[in-house]
Image (cartoon, rainbow, N blue to C red):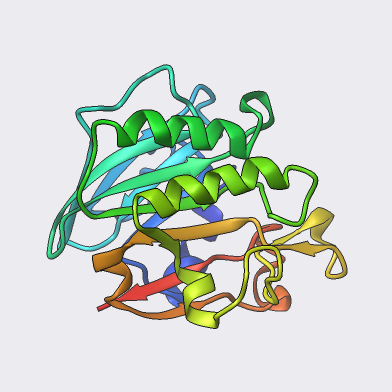
Amino acid sequence: MAFRNDYQKLMTSFGPDIAIITESENEERLKNIQFNDIVWKGDNLNKGIGIFSFSKNYSLELHREYKEEIKDVIPVKVTGTKEFTLFACWAKKEFEYIKGVTESLETYMEHISGNIIIAGDLNANKKWNDSKKYTKFLELLEKNGTRSCYHEKFNEEHGKETKNTHYFRRDSQRGFHIDYCLASKELLEQMIDVDIPEFEDWIEHSDHVPLNVIFN
């Protein structure tokens, strides 16, 4: 809820073209941050989903199929050097976490096709008790030819990840892999690298560490 304090760390560490920030303040409270474009949605001005373009090569706009009643997935039309639809996700308890995200994506994918990226905090992992719900999520992705960048890069199975993206209560011994970037076939073929920083490098800023995916 204080992205303004972590902005410089993100830029010096990764310098992303596009970033999905969950629990982000809205644009009015981020006036000191330099970005090319922003799409922000949330009911709490201090705690929404922020999608930022930090590069003049990419413009963002809320997709015409956006549905205000869907709170856990925000569709964004990305234009510029590469054009695709970005689904920014923040799975929440009130929407049954991965179950809600899956249902939201199903609704949008009935009307949105082409190159897509799904990214954000899914608050889910296949090894947890909601494995059936997670399996349904994977089946939706498979049907649309979409795969996880991390799992493709490191050749790991879902539920058997060796790198964590979240540390419960900032405890280095309680790490989980719950943040994802998933891409459709054409974009996945252009993936160059996936980087997840170490616990020590980021924990003073957040209980999550960034998932950085580089495409050609």
| Image x and y of residue 79, in percent | 14, 52
Q: Is residue 160 left or right of residue 174?
A: left
Residue 94 place in picture, x, y as percent: 66, 24
Q: Is residue 98 visible?
A: yes
Name, please, the residue furthest toward the left. 80
Residue at the top extreme, as displayed = 69
The answer to whether 179 appears left or right of 112 in the picture is: right
Q: Is residue 28 visible?
A: no
Q: Residue at x 54, y 25 (%)?
A: 44
The residue positioned 71% from the left and 70% from the top of the image is: 160
Vertical placement of 60 versus 200: above or below? above
Q: Where does the N terminus fall, quadrant-wise? A: top right
Q: Residue at the location (71% across, 57% down)? A: 207
- Identify which residue, 40 or 175, lies in the foreground: 175
- Residue located 80% across and 60% down the image: 170
Q: Quadrant of the C terminus?
A: bottom left
Q: For residue 77, which quarter of the picture?
A: top left
Between 150 and 19, the residue placed more toward the observer is 150
- Depth check: give the residue in front, 132 or 82: 132
| Placement of 141 over or under 165, stated as above or below | above
Q: How many marks?
A: 0
Across and down, in percent, residue 49 comes to 46, 39
Q: Quadrant of residue 167?
A: bottom right
Q: Position of residue 84 (x, y in %)?
A: 21, 53
Quadrant of residue 161 in the image? bottom right
